Amino acid sequence: ECLFHGIKAVKAGANIREIGRAIQAHADRHGYSLVREYSGHGIGKSFHEGPRILHYDAPSMDTVLRPGVAITIEPMLNAGGRDVLALEDQWTIVTKDGSPSAQWEHTIVVTETGAEILTMREGENWPESVLEEDTGLA
């Protein structure tokens, strides 16, 4: 649900901070922590490029989204503390406290009225709870 709350915050003219605010608000309401070492990013000529998309509220993030910009939103949530570490393979990430963790992502394009999800799988739908919830963040 956090991923979709972040996507719901996307539209032309919105500040990228709103994405992280929406994700963090939902995670906090349900008792989850957000990993801060990893972020979403822009997609363009290079796979990982700006802007950096944080999954928590960061007042310093002041980039305004423009139509046509492609980004990823990929929050990683933990059932315990937010701290993580990389295993020896430098790819596998685990929580320092051993708590369960999960990560989801979508690639989207910013539109005038919201976001077009480019990576939505056939049969995947928006969670009803996200569609119905008014976060009051916008």
Image (cartoon, helix red, strand yellow):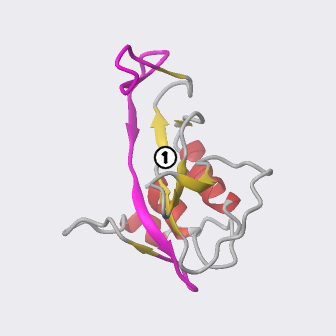
Quarter of the rendering containing residue 90? top left
**Residue 18 left/right relative to 60:** left
Q: Position of residue 88 (x, y in %)?
A: 38, 13
| In the image: residue 12, left or right of residue 114 | right
Q: Magenta stretch?
A: 86-115
Outermost residue on the right side: it is 60
Residue 65 horizontal/vertical position (percent):
65, 71
Coordinates of residue 11 in the picture (x, y in percent): 59, 76
In the image, 14 versus 34, the foreground residue is 14
Magenta-drawn stretch contains 2: no
Q: Nearer the viewer, residue 17 or 31?
A: 17
Horizontal side, residue 122 vs residue 77: left or right: left
Amino acid type, callout 1: Pro
Quarter assignment of residue 122: bottom left
Q: Which residue is mark 1?
A: 75
Is 32 above or below relative to 71?
above
The answer to whether residue 116 is above or below residue 96 is below
Residue at coordinates 54% horizontally, 38% vertically from top-left? 38
Q: Position of residue 41 (x, y in %)?
A: 54, 54
Q: Nearer the viewer, residue 129 or 45?
A: 45
